[in-house]
Image (spheres, grey):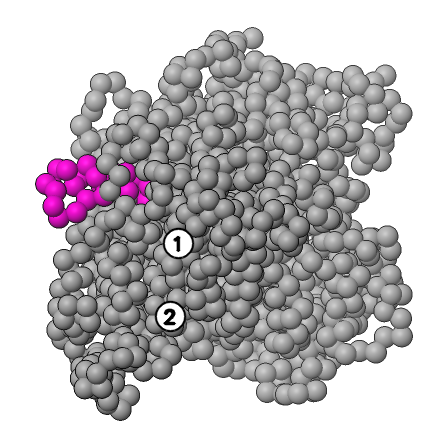
Amino acid sequence: MALLSYVIKRVGLGVLTIFGVLTIIFISIRLVPGDPAVIALGDLANPDDIARLRHAWGLDLPIHEQYIKFMSQVLLHGDFGLSIKNNQPTMMRVLNRLPYTITLAVLGTAIAILIGLLLGVLAALKRNSVIDILVMVFVVLGFSIPVFYLGLVFIQFFSIQLKWFPVLGPNPNYSFMENLRRMILPSIAIAIGIGAVTARMTRSSLLEVLNMDYILTARAKGAPEYRVVFKHALRNALIPVVTIVGLNFGALLGGTVLIEYVFGIPGLGSLLVEAVFERDYPQIQASVFVFSLLFISVNIVVDILYHFLDPRIRLE
Amino acid sequence: MTHPLLDVRNLKTYFYLRRGVVKAVDGVSFRLNRGEALGIVGESGSGKTMTALSILRLVPYPGKIVGGEIIFKGRDLLKLTEKEMRHIRGKEISLIFQDPQNSLNPVFTVGWQVGEAIELHSEGKPLWDRIIEKVINILRGVGIPRVEDRVNDYPHEFSGGQKQRIMIGMSISNNPDIIIADEPTTALDVTIQAQIIDLLKDLRSRYNSSIILIAHNMGLVSELCDNVAVMYAGRIVEYGSIEEIFNDPLHPYTRMLLRCIPRTDIDVDKLESIPGEPPDPVNPPSGCRFHPRCPYAKEECKRDPIYIENIDGHMAVCELYRR
Amino acid sequence: MKIWEMMIESKLFAIGLLILIAITLMAIFADYIAPYDPIAQDFKPKLPPSPKHWLGTDELGRDVFSRLVYGSRITLYVAFVSVSIACLLGIPIGLIAGYYGGKVDKVLNFLIDLMLSFPAIILTILITGMLGPSLTNAMIAISIAFAPRIARIVRGQVLSVKEEDYVVAVKAMGAGGFYTMTKHVFPNSMAPLLVQVTLSLGTAVLVESALAFLGLSAQPPTPSWGDMLNRGRRYIYSAPWMLTAPGIMITLAVLAFNLIGDGLRDLLDPRLRRL
Amino acid sequence: MDKVVRVDNLKVYYERRKGFLSKPQYIKAVDGVTFDIYRGEVLGLVGESGSGKTTIGKALAGIVRPTSGRVIILGKDLYSIRGQEAKKLRTKIQMIFQNPFSSLDPRMRIKDIVTEPLKIAGMKVADLDSRARELIEMVGLSREHLNRFPHQFSGGQRQRIAIARALSTNPELIIADEPTSALDVSIQAQILNLMKELKDKLDLTMLFISHDIGVIRYISDRVLVMYAGKIVESGEKTRLIDEPLHPYTKGLLDAVPVPDPSKRRVNPVVPGEPPDPVNPPSGCRFHPRCPYAKEECKRIEPELKSVDDDRKVACILY
């Protein structure tokens, strides 16, 4: 089947990309000025400890052997080595933190799509009206306001002024429901930017589709306006919107780092920032890898969805 | 005289652009009788497509019908509510477009799209299986081969000619009184064009529908129509029977238009060409809009109102005939 | 088109340009505008806004307004320098990929896609994390993260312009590849590139302030808007003015570039304007 | 007679890969075509979309490399000569495109557009400005137009500019690919008249590609009819159009509606659609649609044979 063979091909390309991403991550440690082990442990560290760390990181091997060791460990065992901080496997620490980040990303995406579609469709249908202008103002502002500042504004307004939400985000000490409540504010904050992009794309895509001849055909058949818009037009208009949401998922993932920092959420993003300040290089590598793995996976899903939505491509 | 099926009176459709107002249709009047095929010809920008869309009240943004009457079976379509108008569209008056590549929705199967046209105008809620049965019959009737296997295919799996057949099938699915065909063959090759014309002729005799054929190709109109309206810059400049228009054109524009077509059947040394370019739609010339390009133009041609010559229904808007 | 004609034609463009000019003037004349030394800890900490200190003072007793004025220098400097470097790297790569096509394009395009498999912020954190936090390293990181974006835009543009009839026409006249490229393809690819570069400047401001917010860009005591915001975060109860001013300034700077970019797009592509 | 162009068994196949791993398919756009163009004649090339007529034009203009066969222009093989010799030959061939809205670089002034072929050719022209004025006036525009940009002109005017550009190097061969099909009939007549006038005045040799037989009849001296990548018939225009031999030519001519209600079509139309260019039918490519098809038409691929004088047809009926 055409769709199946496309899925296989697309996943294959994804695997190739993951290979490349790992190679870049492997190379990245070469950026460290000087000896990474020395920098990680500090100038005053015991030479034996440094030698041990160099050995653990494979820095004492020739470069091609380092590469093979790194790739085989990662690909076979998902092993990026031990964290300097507490000698736990870096991947385990990542997995412990991941649920927060994924929840944040999923909620954020869902809210963004909701806002985006709603405002986009509204603006397109009420073109050049006050509503349209308000939506466009929202789009421009939402696109420009940095997510971390928006998070802080939310805290100032909703948490401190109105006292609707607690200042801090979720953490393991609270119940599931309480944590969900504490996710609301960060999720909305992270959703605004992408919601704005989605709204703009939905609006222009829908306006373009509404100009197509097949929409005129639907109207000429006597189809009522809601049916023309929601059945005939929206399905076509969504095709480019899906792509845009996929591309901007990267920005959303980047946003989680900042939002976790603002709300004190113990997710993958804060782990990455902590690791940077602790010079915990294996931990940085593991965390960055999982971030791009998420991004690559979402893009694969989006591409497949795109093929599913557009029969012109599906059956090629 | 009996009432015509469709009586368009002084129709005006304007587009409000930043640059100014484009009077795309500016006082167009014509009648269409039951069973008649009327051709509306003109060059691009003459307003022929907007006239067609105005009849169905489907003028796109930022256009607006600003005046006139469209009397269809005794009712003014411009006075109907949107809901009443929906019952006219696709049921009593249907539409076929120029570019079959874009006139079918790419994300739905052709069977569903034709079926929708039937479903929208059915009493109650007929079973979808029954509708598909009907769709298959219709599509077979317009010459789609192996219909049973193909109703669930998507538009891009059909050739341009087949798509236009499907569009035609959709347009006749509710046995309408009028089919408006807007340049239905412009995007097609000549041999396919001939097939589509045959199909339209055949349907016309089978269903006794009236046809409004919008075209820039004079040959096409002469092949299919009984009467012709010639449009220039938003107005009808001449109206008459097919023989009158082709054998004895009154308006200089019609005459020159006919003579500037390179013919396949006769050799000419030099084509007659109309000097100049069509007018700027925002600032059309005063009086007769053709006067800046007309070799017979007189001082009076620049003034409104203009003279209308009418001999037994052969009508031309031209000062030449004022005695 | 003259700049002022463009401003009349597109109000958004005009607003964006005015904001950018204001910020630029602020950066150039910082020494004259700022009332106090931005680094000196001369005053009582956390003074609320007053006629003496328009925007109050921070937790170390520095005048927030003065720091804000000087902060504009960092922001514009980082944005322009790193996007320029990204263009220097990205434009040739995109041109080569788009022009040669075939295998060269396949390889380069794969590399571009590979770099784009990292979310921009994550990639810059990786690079600054490895290089160590500093202003220079943040600029290096942003340049590396943005170069593939520029390259992809140039490539796409070249690929589409290459197919235009007027380029085919020049080939039919017997013109060589270099001539076609420099006389026709590249000039006609410039306009959309200009839009993208402007929008990239906005994103660069965003990324730089994010890095500074996380402490990965300019190090204290250098006044930078991201760092000011981060300090303000810690005193969100006791000195809320500390975060409001830099937050608004970052937003305005990003807004300015986005408005100019959108405005340019409208001005350059009248087809889109109709929508 | 003096031959300007000799096309010998020309084949142009385009490769199309459906996916990453799948086998490439070959679109046989032009599949074995042989013809000549003589000095001072206008050769009309007529056919429906997908017949390969545009590809032939591009192959003659030097922008589509043939898969096999040769294009010999002024005695030289266009695709095997190199360097200065190639450059010199290329400047003697100029092309006019279908869409005047996309064939002129929007960023250039008209004076630069019309003289660009001279610059590319490296031709020494004493006074480029006066040459530009001469060219623009030759096509019925005025010298004030030279400082403007393409977007300030209508479609017909732009096509005039494209013609001026094509004439700038005094070419030996002009390839006009559907130069009037994007224009309204009244403007088309102006452009056709201009081209005819220039042809007589400058004794141009031209390949005129069109799907419109009326246009072909008006402008050309001799006609080639193409179907599915092959020439099915060629000959002097009046005879070919008035007494077509090949069943496809007959069908094509019948299908054209004539603006005369007394001459409505009576013959049945050609049924079916043109074949898939990747897998064309065996034997004669027209046989599935041909009313006269016999059993052997499926097997025998008819050659283009002379019937009399300059008349050739590829059909076993003759």
In the image, taking residue D200 as reference, residue C247 lies left or right, namely left
| Circle 2: residue type | Gly
Asked if residue A242 shows in the view, the reply is no
**Does dot 2 land on a helix, a strand or a loop?**
loop
Mark 1, residues whose alpha carbon is within 10 Å: few (<14), some, or many (≥20)?
many
Asked if residue C60 shows in the view, the reply is yes
Vertical comparison of D2 with A277: above or below = below
In the image, taking residue A181 as reference, residue A157 lies left or right, namely right
Would you name the residue on which mark 2 appears? C132
In the image, taking residue B195 as reference, residue A86 lies left or right, namely left
Residues shaded magenta: A169-194
Q: Identify which residue, A83 or A192, lies in the foreground.
A: A83
Q: CA distance from mark 2 to mark 1?
A: 15 Å
Residue at 27 percent of width and 45 percent of height:
A263
Would you name the residue on which mark 1 appears? C213
- Residue B174, image x and y in percent? 34, 25
- Residue B142, image x and y in percent? 35, 39
**Does dot 1 land on a helix, a strand or a loop?**
helix
Residue at 73 percent of width and 66 percent of height:
D166
Residue at 60 percent of width and 23 percent of height:
B13
- Residue A150, image x and y in percent? 38, 41
Q: Looking at the rendering, in which quadrant would you find the C terminus of chain B?
A: top right
| Circle 1: residue type | Phe
